[in-house]
Image (cartoon, rainbow, N blue to C red):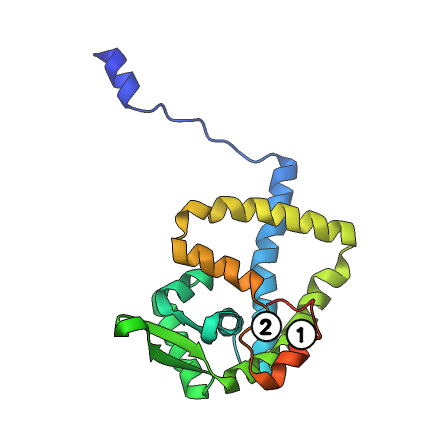
Amino acid sequence: MNKLKRQLIPTARPASWLNHHEWSAWLQLLATVTLLPAAIDSQLQREAGMSHFEFAVMAVLSQQPGRSLQLKDLAVVANGSLSRLSHVISRLERQGWVRRVSGAKGRATNAELTNQGYRKLMEAGPIHFKEVRRLVFDVLTPEEVNDLRRVTSRINGGLIPETNLGPLARRTRASALRQPSQHLPPDVRSRHASEPGRHF
């Protein structure tokens, strides 16, 4: 009986403290994930009149077929809850940057980026990425940028396993990386094509 209990009840593992180097790295990471988003958000609010999450939502929509995506999938791709997204979409609607439309056969609600919203995104993009470059890439060497990408990719791989994403969300992420300009308004498509290095 005692042997059976030991098999069924997992043995508690001893507490594992961080060593000095791990603790120092952890504090630096905590500072970055706290300070950097706040700085980016503050700058976008001040100079572009939108939050970083609103920018991310519009950027995701800009790279979808028809600049439209079902709300539940948009929430996954933009890394936000559906309730938060709904609130943000309402604000973007009031600005004329996004509109809600019925999906296929009226079964779901999609968010669609308007032409006005796309132009606003194009105005905000240089403002946003100038600050990203100033805060992040101007203080790193090319080798450090490679290290940053490698390390953050490994951490993110554990936080958001591919198996946790639905099929449509996985296709959406892949599509966002493959489609830089197919669905842009005619008046900005040529400008976008002339800047192959642009990514949201």
Q: Are marks 2 and 1 in contact (CB under 8 Å)?
A: yes
Residue 82 appears at what percent x and percent y?
A: 35, 66
Q: Amino acid at mark 2?
A: Ser
Say whether residue 182 is left or right of residue 75: right
- Which residue is at the far right? 141
Query: Which of 71 and 184 lies nearest the eye of the viewer?
Result: 184
Q: Secondary structure at mark 2?
A: loop
Q: Determine which quarter of the picture holds residue 119.
A: bottom right
Mark 2 vs mark 1, CA separation in Å: 7 Å
Q: Amino acid at mark 1?
A: Ala
Residue 28's place in the image compared with 176, above or below, is above
State the mark number for residue 181: 2
- Which residue is at the far left? 1
Q: Which residue is mark 1?
A: 193
On the rendered image, what quadrant is the N terminus found in?
A: top left
Could you tell me if residue 47 is visible in this image? no
Q: Residue at x 29, y 23 (%)?
A: 9
Residue 19's place in the image compared with 62, above or below, is above
Pick whichever of labels 2 and 1 is earlier in the sequence: 2
Q: Determine which quarter of the picture holds residue 121.
A: bottom right
Residue 44 appears at what percent x and percent y?
A: 59, 76
Q: Within 10 Å of the Cα at label 2, are there few (<14), some (14-19), or many (20+) other Cα atoms?
A: some
On the rendered image, what quadrant is the C terminus found in?
A: bottom right
Query: Which of 85 and 110 lies nearest the eye of the viewer?
Result: 110
Q: Residue at x 31, y 72 (%)?
A: 104
Residue 191 appears at what percent x and percent y?
A: 67, 80
Residue 107 appears at what percent x and percent y?
A: 26, 70
